[in-house]
Image (cartoon, grey):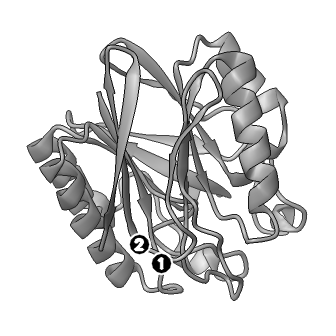
Amino acid sequence: MILAAAQTKPTRGDIDSNLLDHYRLIDLAVQNGAQLIAFPEMSITGYEREYAQKLAFKKDDSRLDHLKKLASENNIIIIAGAPIQIESQLFIGEFIISPDNSVVIYTKQFLHEGEDEFFQSSFNHNPMVTIEEQKISFAICADIDNPLHPENACKRATDIYIASIFFTPNGIPSAYRDLQSYAQKHQMNVLMSNFSGESWGSPSAGQSAFWNNKGELVAQMNDSDSGLLILENKNDNWTSQILKI
């Protein structure tokens, strides 16, 4: 199994530019054999609150068409984030785009302070995917602040827990502490993807990382580069490489 976490520098509100970054990183992941690539929170738009409604996506959004094409042609699962409108409600969500052209949505379950002015939270959109008999669950940012979230993932027999986040330099130490703890306590491999550039007028901490199911930090990126963290599992042994762009 080969997984990739993308570490990106979003351009605020510039969907076309951000999607081009997604395409480049997906191509790089494919060249390195990845079966799944995960992007940070609201990766397509950059993290937004006040302008999220204007930037919102829908499940059948035509702007996802090329991502669907890349998933299908390259047999890769793509996790890309955006503000997502479902019926009349707005969510912080991510699209899980599979090679069979299916698109399912995960919605953030636990919101940061102030996000509830713009977004709803929901437990109703909580899909899992399976690669090589490994069950994969998802989390977005503040979800990892609540121990109930990884606990629920564990109850669903999750093997790999993927967190797409936007954490600042002040917040990243707690994210590392919590994710390491969840990996060890629940015996789950944990993959985390974070921005490396400013979003919403705030700095992001980068340091996308992976912990194995013993809670050992296998690899991490630095706080400034864009690129991929690639993880490969052979016989329950994870190895890594970092690809900068």
Closer to the chain start, of discs 2 and 1, is 1
Q: Is residue 165 above or below residue 203?
A: above
Disc 2 secondary structure class: loop
Q: Quadrant of residue 77?
A: top left
Instruction: State left or right for residue 124 relative to residue 102.
Output: right
Q: In the rendered image, which quarter contains the C terminus? A: bottom left
- The local secondary structure at tag 1 comes to loop
What residue does disc 2 label? 226
Quarter the N terminus occupies: top left
Are the residues at dot 2 and dot 1 in contact (C-beta closer than 8 Å)? yes
Q: Badge 2, how many Cα within 10 Å: few under 14, some, many 20+?
A: many
Which residue appears at 66% of the width and 27% of the height? Answer: 183
Does residue 176 show up? yes
Which residue lies under the disc numbered 1? 9
* In the depicted structure, whether residue 15 falls above or below residue 83: below
The percent position of residue 179, horizontal first and vertical second, equals 70, 39
Which residue appears at 73% of the width and 29% of the height? 182
Tell me the crowding category of disc 1: few under 14, some 14 to 19, or many 20 or more residues within 10 angstroms, Cα based. Answer: many
Q: Position of residue 18 (x, y in %)?
A: 38, 77
Q: Quadrant of residue 118?
A: bottom right
Q: Nearer the viewer, mark 2 or mark 1?
A: 2
Quadrant position of residue 208: bottom right
Q: Position of residue 106 (x, y in %)?
A: 56, 41
Q: CA distance from mark 2 to mark 1?
A: 7 Å
Amino acid type of the residue tagged 1 in the rendering: Lys
Residue with the most extreme left position? 73
Q: Camera-side residue: 141 or 222?
A: 222
Q: Residue 139 placed where, x, y %? A: 63, 41
* Residue 87 seen by the camera: no
Three-letter code, disc 2: Ser
Q: In the rendered image of this protein, does residue 80 appear above or below residue 206?
A: above
